[in-house]
Structures are given as C-alpha cells and as structure tokens.
Amino acid sequence: MHKDETAGAPIRQFPFAPVMLVSLAQHFGRPSRAIVREGQEVQRGQCLAEADGEVSVATHAPASGVVQRIDLVPGIAGKMVPGIYLKPFPGSTQEIAAASPCDLDAATPDEIITAIQQAGIVGLGGAAFPTHVKLRIPPDKSVDTLVINGVECEPYLTTDHRVMLEQRDDVFMGIRYLMKATGVARALIGVEANKADVARALQQALPVDLPAEVVVLPVKYPQGAEKMLLKALLQREVPSGGLPLDVGAVVVNVATTAEIGRLLPRGQGIQERVITITGPAVKKKGNYRIPIGTPLRFALDFVGVEDDLGQVFLGGPMMGQSLPSLDIPITKGTSGFVAFRRDQSLQARAEFPCINCGYCVDACPLFLNPARLGLLAQHRRFDEMAAGYHLMDCFECGSCSYVCPAHIPLVQRFRGAKSFLRKVEAAG
Amino acid sequence: MSAPGRTLAIETSPHLASGASVDTIMRNVVYALLPVACYAVYLFGLSALLVLVTATLSCVLTEHLMCRAAGRATSVRDWSVVITGLLYGLTLPPALPLWMVASGGVIGVALGKVLFGGLGYNAFNPALVGRVFLQAAFPTAMTTWYPALLPQRFMELPSSILTFPFARPDFDGLTAATPLAQMKFDQLSTPATELVLGTTAGSTGETGALLILAGGAWLVARNMMNWRIPAAIFATVAVASALLHWVDPQYYPGPVFMLFSGGLMLGAVFMATDMVASPITRRGVIVYGVLIGALVVVIRVWGGMPEGVMYAILLANAVSPHIDNLVRPRVFGTGGGRAL
C-alpha cells in the first residue's frame, strides 16, 4: 500500500547537516558512554561512545568534525536524552577511520557477537534492540533457524525493499556472520509478494554454498512482526509472553543483516542508514542513505514539504508515532518518515458506539477480542483486560483501529491500559 | 519548511483507516432491504406501503424525540433506526391497523433500543421487540392475513387498516391462511414455487425469499453481513426438518417448505444478523445460528403457534453475550490446536 511511490527510487546519499545530533540513547537498553571530550576532533566512523554493559552498544561518529558539546539532545519519545553535538568539517573528504576488520573465517562466534556490539548494530527495523543480545543463545535453548525479516509490511516504507535490491551481497555476507554467530544450519529470508523483484534478484544471486532460502509470502499486514513471520515461515507459534528463541529461531531485520555484512569485514561502526522519506506532504519522496544524527528538520528541508503539512510519523503510518517536534535527529531505529497533509487527519471523524460488528476480532492477528478489550478499558477494568483477555500480548499493530467502523481509538485505549498496568507493576 | 507558525498535529497510531463507518454499513443494509420492501408493495398493494411507511416513521420519530427529550444529539443519522423501522414493517401483516403499527414501533424503539442506551447497547433486536409486543397485545390482528396479488390491491385499502385506535378492527372476508398455518392446522402443503416466489399470504416482507437472499448476498459481498449466521440457521433447519420428514413424511414438512415458509428467510438474513445483538466471534455466531435454527424447528413443529422465528431470534439474542464469554477464540501462542 502506497509503496509504489518510492519502491523504484534508488537509494541516494544525503548531505551532512551543519550540526549533527548524535544521541547516545538510540538503542534499547543503557545509553552508550561517551569516550570523547568537548572540542575534540573526530574522524568519521570513530567510536564516540562505548557500550555500557551487555544491553547497550557503541555509538560512532557519522562525520569527521569537532565535538561541540556533550549535552542533552531531543529524543524521539519527547524527552531529552544524552547526546553529542558534532559539527562536521565543511571541506573534509569524510574518509572513514581505518579499523581492524572482523574476519568471517578466523573469528569465533563470540568474537563476531562482540564485533556486532562494537559496531553499534541494533535492530534497524524500528525496535533498535541491540542485535548481539539476540545472538547469544542461552545454554538451555536451542536454535535451528535464522530468519531474515524482509517483509516490511508497513505501508509507504520501502527501505528494506531497496536495501535488498541494492545491497544483496551485503545481505548474504551478513547472513554468513549471523549463522556463524548463532551456529544455525539454515536461514530463511521472508519477503512479501509485493516485492517480487527482490525475491527474483535474491534468488538469482544466492551463493550456492549459502544454506539460505528466499520465501515469498502473501501480502498480509502485520506479517513483519516477529511472531507473525515465524508462524508464516515455520508454522511455529511463539508462546504468549515468549521470544522467538522459545521456538528455536532468531529473527533479524534484513537492513540490520546488510549492515552487519557491510561493516564487519571493514571493522567499521554504523555511521549512516537507509530511510524512506515519503507521504503525500513530501515533495522529493525517496530512499536515502542518511548520516545518523541528521536533524529531521534538515532532512525535511532537503526533500521539501508541502505547505499543508499536518503530521510527520516516525516509521510507517500503522505503528509509527506522530512527532511533536522536528528537532529530533535521525537515529539507528529510524526506518523512515511519512508526512501527511492536514486533511488526512483521522481526528475529525465522528465516533460511534461499538456495534459489535466483529471486524476487529477478525482483524486481530493474535486472535484477541479488541471490542471487549476496548469496552473494559473504557470502564478502567485494566486487570481484567490482562488476566482474562491477554492485553499484554497486543503489540499495537493497529489492525483493529484500522477496520473499526465506529472509529473507536482501540489501540490508544490499549496503550493507556498497558502503561497503567506497567506502572502498577513497577510500583510493586 | 521552517516557516514560522507551522503547527504539527499529534495523533496516535494507526494513522490510516479503512473507509467503512457505522452509518455506511447501516445505510447499505437499508439499500439491501429496499427491493424486499418494493416487492412487498407489489404483492400486497397500498396497505403494505402504508404499513411500511408508518412503521419506519414511528420508529425514526420515537428515537429522534427521545434523544431530544434526553437533551442529546439525535442519533437517527446513523441510519440504524431506519433499518429497525423497515424491518419491523416487513414483519407485520399487510392489513394491520396503522395505529397498532405505530404503537409497536414506539414500543420497539423506546423499550428495545433507546432505554438500553441506543445503538450498540440493545440486547434484543428492536424490530422484534415491537413485533413481540403486538403479538401479545393483538393476537387476532397479528394473525389475520391477506392473500397476495389481490386484483384491487392498488385501488382500495382493506377496511381494517384505518381502524380507529382501540376500536375493534373489521377484517374483510378476504383473509387467507399462511402456508405455515395451513400446514399446522390443516396439514395442507403449499407448492414450492409459490413459496419461493412468495405469492402466498404472509407478513408484508417475509415472502420475497429470493430478494431477501439477493440483498443478503450483496451485503455479504460488501463485508457488511456475517454470512455464517444465516448459513448456520439454514443448515440447522434443513438438517433437522429433513430428519423429521424422513421419520414421518405425512406429519412433518420437508426442508424446502421449512426454509421458504414464514419469516425464516427474513429473520435469518436480516434479523438474526443484527450485529449488536449477535455474538462477535466466528465460532460464537455459528453456535448462535444453530441455536436459532433448532428453536425455530422446535417451536414450529411442537409449539402451539405455527411460526417461531421471532421467539427463536429473541431468545438467542438473550444468550448472545454469554456465547461470547463461553466460545472464545484461542489466543495466539497459548497452545492447543489451530487458532479459530
């Protein structure tokens, strides 16, 4: 849906902004710890901050320049987070700092996993969960399949689409690193049928010695969610509250895989990523390789937006959040921005009472009862939502709200209920 | 871009929506009912037209005035009360005194819908609440039928229809028995072609079986009707009546008669499928449909009345929330067999 506008647009390089805002909390887990000081000159690709503990990754310089300040930068959740203001040198050749590569054949699985952490690699699909954490298989679990997630089911976004077309050798190299790190014997690359060109290209170029298979799945939102993808590819159901590990699989996003395949052989860290900037309010819709830390305002100025800009979403329009400010920088988890016109707001729609039509029940990929959950939320019966109706399994894909003819903000109610319950739990 | 004064809107995801809305669904159900209503007028003439108009107006006005009285915005624009009015009119005998038609409409919408909280909160199908009131209050008038296709049906009105309120209706000598009554009391069968074409005596809208099915199919194609409900009802009625017919062909009518006589078609397609009063899960609606089908057969075959669709649906409406509680889909990742 709406992918045609950018699916054919080759990835273009974005220029450097006058000042880059490199967040140290781009990933899930503890922020990285700065190892540079204010006023220090750094080279592109140089490590600016180290991982702070196991669930944390390193952060690298997106450009050669000078560290202006180490301070707070705007975070995507609306809060300020620790970060580095980096001023790129205007005339620099922007050569990437030389480093020691991680050799696929020589490195042990553990060395690969450490290299992935040091390269600052996190889930580029949007979750920004440190990838190396997923690769350390606990001794009591066994894993037999590596699943490469190339589904990209969000409307509008074509980041993964372009990466798979233009960086397929990086994808294959990434798969080799991931398979060695986890010790699995086979890999499956899942793509949806709306990316037939990708499937063809990958299949044609698949190296004979790589035990990987490209599986074309029917187009079905939200198939890009790990649980849905594992069900579609392997007919395995991740238990309620469980992880892909519980059904013997590790799932890695395809853009993440490509970055691993591109960076590890060169020993570099992430300095940039591919994003889609699109939507009816964007003039130069397209796919861009953009330095991490580029302020969103600079990016939108570059592509141009219409005067009746209404909302900008971080990610796709189904699960992406609408941004309160354009001052946030691009982070590793940013898969794209979708900008809507003002008249595309859903806020103005009249809300009706629930008529029990059952559309939401049919739409829920987890077979929950969103209508009942919505009613319980309205009556603030949050405990019952969790205990009797599996509220906590909901991953907010938005399918129920999307189909609801009564225009009830179901997902919003569920989010509120979940955050309430989490707070209660945290308070003991 | 950095133009001053630009404001960003913040809304919660998802930011996309499918086009359907409650009023669109309701309006489409009205469209699906219109051919049935036109056929009713063709079969029974002016009196059917008056009954349908009075029924619809009484229902719409009741909801509108009650909303006004309660000091809130009128809800008639969601079209649901138009469905109620039309459906209610289609279940009434074509020569029913108009004051009875109007009083049933008021009762159905006031007690069956608005007092429950309006659309979305009614436990029972409001059209049937109105009808069940009339059945209890005016049993004779509610079981006095006119034959279809009377030659003078577009010229003159049956004298009963304009009866003064609370006066005794005076029915012409033209009354006829419905196929179900003939079967129940006289063991007379009606030819299948007449049943399918609906050229028999009956409620204004219940006899146009083919148009009812066509309207239902159109709604199903637009995903505005749950086909599982009529399918479960038809299957249950067909199987149960086939079994009974096989045991004693003389006494028990066969499946074709059971499916195409009385209010089964109208009830199964347009009444039982009332989204508000039916279960929400896929398996739940099957249970609900089977229950309605079984109750219809039981009431028709062993009950004191010739017809039981209305009671069957109302009883099933009553248990529908409990069906949703009992028949829950297996949540993803909670073990057991295949989902749904």
Image (cartoon, rainbow, N blue to C red):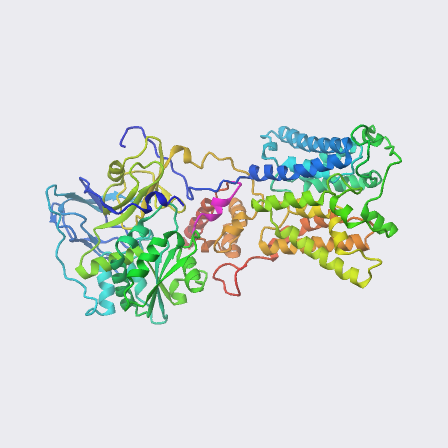
Kindly tell me whether residue A426 is visible in this rendering. Answer: no
Which quarter of the figure is the N terminus of chain A placed in? top left
- Name the side, left or right, on which A113 lies relative to A247: left
The quadrant holding residue B84 is: top right
- Name the side, left or right, on which B261 lies relative to A358: right
The quadrant holding residue B69 is: top right
Q: Measured from the top left, where is residue B339 in percent x and y?
A: 52, 60
Q: Is A195 above or below relative to A248? A: above
Which quarter of the figure is the C terminus of chain A placed in? bottom left
Question: Is residue A30 within the magenta segment?
Answer: no
Kindly tell me whether residue A361 is visible in this rendering. Answer: yes
- Name the side, left or right, on which B282 lies relative to A272: right
Q: Measured from the top left, where is residue A370 in percent x and y?
A: 51, 49
User: Which residue occupies 30% across, 70% down?
Assistant: A183
User: Which residue occupies 47% across, 44% down?
Assistant: A402
For this orientation, the residue located farthest to the right is B173
Question: Is residue A399 within the magenta segment?
Answer: yes
Closer-to-camera residue (B285/B318): B285
Q: Measured from the top left, where is residue B231 in percent x and y?
A: 65, 53
Closer-to-camera residue (A85/A334): A334
Q: Measured from the top left, where is residue A88 in percent x and y?
A: 14, 43
- Name the side, left or right, on which B85 lies relative to A75: right
Q: Is A273 above or below relative to B15? A: below
Closer-to-camera residue (B291/A77): B291
Q: Is B122 above or below relative to A126? A: above
Closer-to-camera residue (B258/A91): B258
Q: What span is colored magenta in the figure?
A: A395-406
Tally of numbered discs: 0
